[in-house]
Image: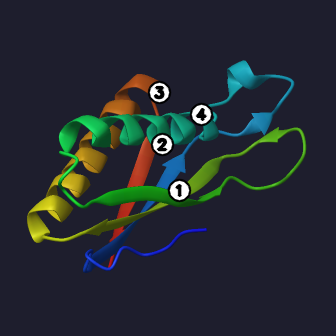
Amino acid sequence: MYKKNPERNIFFNVALNILGKGGHSSVPYLTDNPILPGFRLIQIINEKLLYEFSSFQNVAFFPYYFDAGSTQNIIPDNAVLKFQGECTNIEDKQQLLEIFTLTVKALENIYHFKTRIVYEK
């Protein structure tokens, strides 16, 4: 169970809409599956945070929502991925958002998909 850190006083959310091309799961090569880059994004963000912040910086950035539908045998057209960020100062927040944005843009080029990022308070 998640327990808030009392030292972190800045909270924010980021929503990412991954725009793919759906289709039947029997022909995945005809689709652009939005689930694959979504999971890869989670992995990369977790890895990057280990090397971008010192252990003394009190930051957290974690996924809390991933929805790509629930229809059987269908690769979805789109997926929604939401992250929550927590930190103690505005500089760390800006660095978290920059890491997220740059990583999303890099994955767009690798996986050939489009996204919409919504920065929420």
Q: Which mark is residue 113?
A: none
Q: Dot 1 corresponds to which residue?
A: 81
- Tell me the kind of residue under disc 4: Leu
- What residue do we see at 67% from left, 29% from top? 31
Q: In the rendering, at what x and y percent does residue 105 appear?
A: 30, 39
Q: In the rendering, at what x and y percent does residue 63 appear?
A: 50, 56
> Which numbered disc flags the more N-terminal residue, 3 or 1?
1
Callout 4: helix, strand or loop?
A: helix
Crowd class of label 4 (few under 14; some 14 to 19; many from 20; radius 10 Å): few
Q: Dot 4 corresponds to which residue?
A: 36
Q: Is residue 15 left or right of residue 60?
A: right
Q: CA distance from mark 1 to mark 2?
A: 9 Å
Q: CA distance from mark 2 to mark 3?
A: 15 Å
Q: CA distance from mark 4 to mark 2?
A: 10 Å
Q: Which is in the foreground here, disc 3 or disc 1?
A: 1
Q: Which mark is residue 111?
A: 3
Q: Is residue 25 above or below residue 12?
A: above
Q: Dot 2 corresponds to which residue?
A: 42
Crowd class of label 3 (few under 14; some 14 to 19; many from 20; radius 10 Å): some
Q: Which is in the foreground here, disc 3 or disc 4?
A: 4
> Which numbered disc flags the more N-terminal residue, 4 or 2?
4
> Which numbered disc flags the more N-terminal residue, 4 or 1?
4
Crowd class of label 1 (few under 14; some 14 to 19; many from 20; radius 10 Å): many
